[in-house]
Image (tube, grey):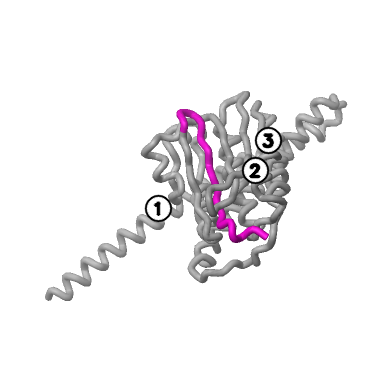
C-alpha cells in the first residue's frame, strides 16, 4: 500500500514537472520568435526603402544600409546563441570542446567584436571602443581559447551593453590581469542592476526588473551562455557594480598564454 502511494506521488510530481517544462518551452519559443521577428522586420523595412524607384539621397542610403548591417549583426548574434544552447552543456559534461582551443590575439578579437557593434551603437547614440594600451598586460602573447566561443561571450555582453546603456555614454573594452589571471573587462553605464539581482544575472532565463521594463522581449540566455563558456575554459567571471555603472570581467588562467 505504501509503495502504491509512493508511486502515485511520484507520478503526480513527474506530471507537474512535465507541465512546467512544457510551459517554459512554450514561453521560450515565443520569446525566440519575437526576438527574431524584430530584426528581420527592420531589415525588410530598410531594403524596401532602398528599392524605391525614386532617387534616394546618399545620406538616407547610408542610414538604411547601416540599419541593415546593425540588424543583421543582432540576428546573427541571436541565432548563434540559440545554436549554442543545444550543445554547450553536453560539451561541458564531456569535458571537451567541439572545436580545439587555439592561440588568439585578444586585442584583435576585441577590436573585431567592437567593430561589429559600432553601427548599432551609433544608431542609438552611444560610443563603443577598445582601450588598446591596456592590452600590454598580455606582453604580445596569445591566449589559448576556443575563439568562436569567446567571441560569442564577448558579443553577448556587448549586445547587452549597447541595448541597455544610456544615450551619449561610452562602452569601454579593456584588458585586465589579477595575480594568476588575465582577461578583459567591458564597462557601461545604463539601466541599474540591483544588488540582489547581481547574484542571479548568470542564471538561465533570468532578466532584471529594470531590463524587462526597458526591453520586454528577451530570452535571458545571453549571460547564462557567457558563464557556461567561461566555465568550459576553467576561467571565472565577475560583475562589479557602481550605481549605474556595470563592469563585466572575464578572467582566464595566465598559464593559458603562449
Q: Is residue 212 left or right of residue 32?
A: left
Is residue 178 or residue 171 the one in the foreground? 178
Query: On the image, numbered disc 3 is attached to which residue?
Result: 129
Is residue 35 or residue 53 the one in the foreground? 35
Instruction: Looking at the image, tell me whether mark 3 or mark 1 is earlier in sequence order.
Output: 1
Instruction: Looking at the image, tell me whether mark 2 or mark 3 is earlier in sequence order.
Output: 2
Q: Is residue 114 above or below residue 153?
A: above
Is residue 86 or residue 54 the one in the foreground? 86
Is residue 130 or residue 88 the one in the foreground? 130
Q: Indicate which disc residue 74 carries.
A: 2
Q: Is residue 91 above or below residue 170?
A: below
For discs 3 and 1, the disc positioned in front in the rendered view: 3
* Residue depicted at x 55% and y 43%: 34
Query: On the image, numbered disc 1 is attached to which residue?
Result: 23
- Residue 23 showing in the rendered view: yes
Q: Is residue 121 above or below residue 203?
A: above
Instruction: Looking at the image, tell me whether mark 2 or mark 1 is earlier in sequence order.
Output: 1
Q: Secondary structure at mark 3?
A: strand
- Mark 2 touching mark 1, by CB under 8 A? no
Q: Secondary structure at mark 2?
A: helix
* Residue depicted at x 70% and y 36%: 118
Residue 100 x/y as whole percent: 65, 67
Q: Which image quarter: residue 20?
A: bottom left
What range is drawn magenta here? 242-258
- Measured in 3D between alpha carbons, the distance from the residue under mark 3 to the one under mark 1, in whole angstroms, is 41 Å
* Residue depicted at x 59% and y 49%: 183
For discs 2 and 3, the disc positioned in front in the rendered view: 3
**Dot 1 alpha-carbon crowd within 10 angstroms: few under 14, some 14 to 19, many 20 or more:** few
Residue 187 x/y as whole percent: 57, 36
Q: Indicate which disc residue 45 carries.
A: none
- Measured in 3D between alpha carbons, the distance from the residue under mark 2 to the one under mark 3, in whole angstroms, is 18 Å
Q: Which image quarter: residue 39?
A: top right
Amino acid at each position: 500500500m505504501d509503495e502504491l502511494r509512493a508511486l502515485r506521488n511520484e507520478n503526480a510530481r513527474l506530471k507537474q514537472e512535465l507541465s512546467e517544462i512544457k510551459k517554459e518551452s512554450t514561453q521560450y519559443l515565443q520569446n525566440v520568435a519575437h526576438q527574431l521577428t524584430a530584426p528581420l522586420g527592420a531589415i525588410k523595412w530598410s531594403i524596401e526603402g532602398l528599392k524605391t524607384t525614386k532617387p534616394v539621397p546618399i545620406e538616407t542610403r547610408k542610414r538604411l544600409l547601416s540599419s541593415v548591417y546593425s540588424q543583421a549583426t543582432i540576428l546573427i548574434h541571436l541565432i548563434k546563441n540559440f545554436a549554442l544552447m543545444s550543445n554547450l552543456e553536453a560539451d561541458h559534461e564531456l569535458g571537451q570542446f567541439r572545436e580545439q582551443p587555439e592561440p588568439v590575439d585578444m586585442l584583435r578579437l576585441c577590436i573585431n567584436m567592437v567593430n561589429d557593434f559600432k553601427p548599432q551603437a551609433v544608431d542609438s547614440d552611444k560610443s563603443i571602443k577598445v582601450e588598446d594600451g591596456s592590452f600590454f598586460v598580455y606582453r604580445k602573447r596569445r591566449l589559448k581559447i576556443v575563439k568562436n566561443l569567446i567571441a560569442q561571450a564577448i558579443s553577448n555582453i556587448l549586445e547587452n551593453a549597447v541595448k541597455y546603456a544610456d544615450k551619449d555614454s561610452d562602452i569601454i573594452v579593456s584588458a585586465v590581469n589579477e595575480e594568476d589571471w588575465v582577461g578583459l573587462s567591458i564597462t557601461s553605464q545604463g539601466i541599474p542592476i540591483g544588488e540582489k539581482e547581481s547574484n542571479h544575472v548568470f542564471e538561465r532565463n533570468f532578466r532584471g526588473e529594470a531590463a524587462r521594463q526597458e526591453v520586454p522581449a528577451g530570452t535571458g540566455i545571453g549571460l547564462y551562455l557567457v558563464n557556461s563558456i567561461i566555465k568550459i575554459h576553467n576561467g571565472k567571471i565577475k560583475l562589479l557594480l557602481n550605481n549605474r555603472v556595470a563592469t563585466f570581467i572575464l578572467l582566464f588562467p595566465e598559464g593559458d598564454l603562449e
